[in-house]
Image: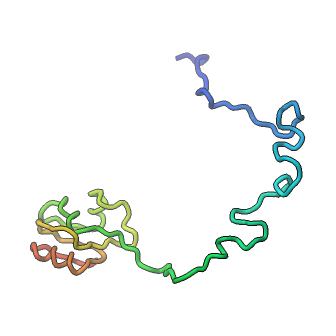
Amino acid sequence: MKLYELAPAPGANVDVYRKGRGHGSGNGKTSGKGHKGQKARSGGSIRPGFEGGQMPLQRQIPKRGFVNIFATKYAVINVEDLEVFEDGAVVDEQAIVEAGLLKKTLDGVKVLGRGELTKKLTVNVAAFSESAKQKIEEVGGKAEVK
């Protein structure tokens, strides 16, 4: 390849579209804004959800309930998912992410009781359901709250 053979990729160079530069340009006079009206004026953009002074839909719909913004959000995993680990392994949040079972641990990992476990594991996470704790301890493992 020579220096004179270099060229931008097809479609990479696009001519600048110049509005309001005479009617010969195809976009002169009103510059694509039509005749008069709110959208034709300078600063004439309206915010999303604005309905021209009518009560907006998001204010008409009743709001109910309460969302606790301080609530603990657990990333959940089931007992059956722990079968990927070696027998006798120590399973913590980092090991679960490295094994590809979870992408994010949020405020902590909670183990739920779906499925069966055959391996003796020491599981060290933020929370357990009663059934998950029981199944881990039945096979000789430990369920430790971090």
Above-or-below relation of 28 to 4: below
Q: How is the image coloured?
A: rainbow
On the image, which quarter does residue 11 sit in? top right
Q: Measuring 26% from the left and 73% from the top, which residue is drawn there?
A: 112
x, y (%) of residue 68?
Answer: 49, 81
Question: Residue at the location (51% across, 83% down)?
Answer: 66
**Residue 15 picture location, percent across and down:** 73, 31
Residue located at (25% from left, 78% from top): 129
Q: Is residue 89 left or right of residue 54?
A: left
**Viewer-side residue, 55 vs 135:** 55
Question: Which quadrant would the C terminus be assigned to in this image?
Answer: bottom left
Vertical placement of residue 109 versus 5, above or below = below
- The front one of 134 and 145 is 134
Front position in the image: 134 or 51: 51
Q: Is residue 116 above or below residue 138?
A: above
x, y (%) of residue 45? Answer: 78, 58
Residue 68 as seen in the image, left or right of residue 140: right
